[in-house]
Image (cartoon, rainbow, N blue to C red):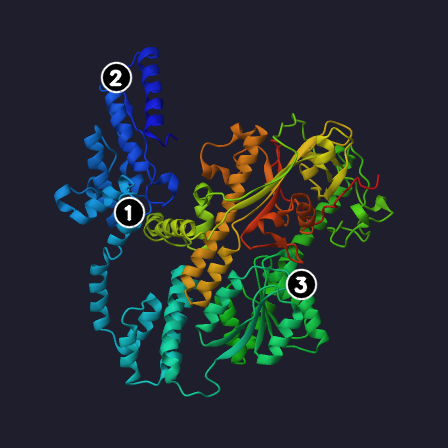
Amino acid sequence: MARTAERKLAISQRAYDRATTVHGMQPEDLLFDPLVLPVSTGMETDRRSALETIEGVRAISRAMPAAQTTCGLSNVSFGLKPQARVVLNSVFLHELREAGLTSAILHFSKILPRNKIDDAQWQSALEVIYDRRAETSGDPLQRFIGLFADAGAAEAASAKASARATETIEQRLRSHIIDGEKEALDATLATALATYTPLAIINDHLLDGMKTVGDLFGSGQMQLPFVLQSAEVMKLAVSKLEPLMEKKAGTSKGSIVLATVKGDVHDIGKNLVDIILSNNGYTVHNIGIKQPIASIVEAFKKTKADAIGLSGLLVKSVTVMEENLRELNALAIDVPVVLGGAALARHYCEGHLRSVYAGRVYYGKDAFEGLRVMDHLVTGKHAVLDDEIAERSAKRAAAEAVVAKHQHVRDAVAVHTPATAASTAVMDRAPALAGAGGGSGDELATGDSTPTGSSEPQSTPRIARSRISEVPVPTVPFFGTRAVQNIAPEQVYPFINKIALYRGQWQVKKGATTDEAYEHLVADEMDPIFARLSAQCSRERIVQPQVVYGYFPAQSEGNDLVVYQPEPWNAGRELVEAERFSFPRQRSGKQLCISDFFRPVGSEVDVVAMHCVTVGHKASEEAHKLFAANSYAEYLYLHGFCVETAEALAELWHKRIRQEMGIGNDDAPNVRALFTQKYRGSRYSFGYPACPDMADQDKLFRLLKPERIGCVLTENWQIVPEQSTSAIIVHHPDAKYFAVSASAPPLSAASE
């Protein structure tokens, strides 16, 4: 897209010349839209968007006076509050008409004449449109946004005040919590204290409001950010009431020790549980991330908590949870344990892990399920939870029996069906059925009792290699690695996946709301937060994008990707193996394996790219400050924004690598399409189905040396800082994401 007036004119002139000279069209039949990008993002690249569009219209009108011009106005103010958008759009339209615009795409009800716009708002809009930062103090965009901070609030406040006036004091207490409303909280508490004790206010009224919040969240009627605003009000109210309470035991509903397990650096889920439990009357001992079982046990013994809560994002963390349960058994500790995390499935927790532990184990899908579990435990109603688990297990067992019955029938039919060539094919590279290095204990199951790496390969079927065609090897600018620092955040922000951010990180989900209502929620609430955080994180250097990446000579050998040292290759000497990655293969279908996308040993040397990206340590540090300050909603917003900025940096740098490889022309023209792999090749991160072994991070780190940009690995191969990611990048056009069954053997040619 043309961003400058000069480019807008050049493109229009080229189109004009072709239309009039080649196709014989009349100039007055041509309509040019120079396009405007939002000036509301706060990003440096967008600051002059309105100005360049105005000047583009002026230049087009002068160069081609008989042609028409138009512009879709609303894009210039995207993400601002509705009242701010009306003003900015109206002023922008005025300036465009002055420059020669002959038509516009607009909604007539969203445009105001000059005499109906306040002078201060008009002038502030002009400062934004013409990017007058150099001529004014401060940021014109933030000043303009500030003019509308209370826009529409007067009417809402009046209506809310009228409603509050008719509420009883008990209803007002609940409303403060449910609405996340801090205004007039002191007055409400003062009135309530004339009738109730501080403890009664908390237990009987404020907690009742939090219960309603939980019900609204569970039914999809309240989004997580607004739940956290309610929790902030609850925390504030309790902090004001606590000094007035008698200091005595028994004022807490119960207590729990919370920890993210050893090797796992993720704490957002655990901290959300902390917020909900602590604001529903529980004492939470949150001991942090990467906690070994010894520290967890020490905290439990010190606090005499009613339960232990363990969290973790990684697949490896589920294994650590099991190890922790076995260690608790060895220590004769049988306190109830609540487990949660993205990689933990309910049936695995309530089935296998529950059978491992001598005490009770419960699954917490989210913070509110954790709250429900605790409510039942401390009131002696654990039998209700146990009965629910038994009922779910019985239903699952019945379903599995039906599946097994049908499988038995299929197997019986297969016995009498001649084998096809495909089902008995042998890999054309004839790999041995042994894991490189004799097996590490992390191999995927082969479906029989013979361990991977056994000397009896006849017990495991050979798998046909996928039919991947060979393509020319791209030319890369260098072999080796480079570190890139001081990347401007504004280069990264356009690659943020807002759907993943809003719905995934911020958990603002559509649910049962209409499309129109959800679009309004996003435009009026989420987009302004995104614009504000973009500007803040750039201004305060909260995100500091850094990359280390490189290109390496490589070839495939069976299921292995053999990566060679770049130095001998650069010098024209014999290839020297640097690292070897062994990947699993699909047992059926296309029988894909990542190694198939590279030229085999004995043929032309191929190339593989790798990168590790991070937005730095400050992102986590600032998020933790917000959590400690009880700014729960801001904590959620900032944490999620920084996580998705790291993902955006990976997307940006993958695009850079494709460009350097000379395959960037296959990219989709819009960024959103890149999120669904509308480009040539693929990038694979460890821990996902096609390359599940997280231990391979060690090999990537030895090759790239990401320590240069501040990245290190935990004992579970998780990258610190948390907002970091790494990947192997494959150039082959057939390389896309694919799943590998847990029963697929990781074939290797390492021992041929």
> Residue type at mark 1?
Pro
**Disc 1 and disc 2 in contact, CB within 8 angstroms:** no
Question: Mark 3 = which residue?
Answer: 320
- For the C terminus, the image quarter is top right
* Residue at the far right in the pictured view: 455
Nearest to N terminus: mark 3 or mark 2: 2
Q: Secondary structure at mark 1?
A: helix
Relative horizontal placement of residue 146, taking residue 413 as reference (left or right): left
Total marks placed: 3
User: In the rendered structure, which amino acid carries the disc numbered 2?
Assistant: Pro
SS label for mark 2: helix
Specify few, some or many for label 2: CA neighbours under 10 Å numbering under 14, 14-19, or 20 or more. some
Looking at the image, is mark 1 or mark 2 nearer the viewer? 1
Secondary structure beneath dot 3 equals helix
Residue under pointer 1: 140
Dot 2 corresponds to which residue? 27
Image quarter of residue 294? bottom right
What crowding class fits label 1: few (fewer than 14 Cα within 10 Å), some (14-19), or many (20 or more)? many
Nearer to us of marks 1 and 3 is 1
Mark 1 or 3 closer to N-term? 1
Front position in the image: 419 or 463: 463
The answer to whether residue 382 is above or below residue 269 is: below
Mark 3–mark 2 Cα distance, whole angstroms, equals: 72 Å
Q: Residue at 36% x, 39% y: name it.
A: 46
Q: Position of residue 659 (x, y in %)?
A: 54, 31
Using the image as rendered, state which of residue 4 and residue 451 is in the foreground: 4
Would you place residue 516 above or below residue 50 in this image?
below
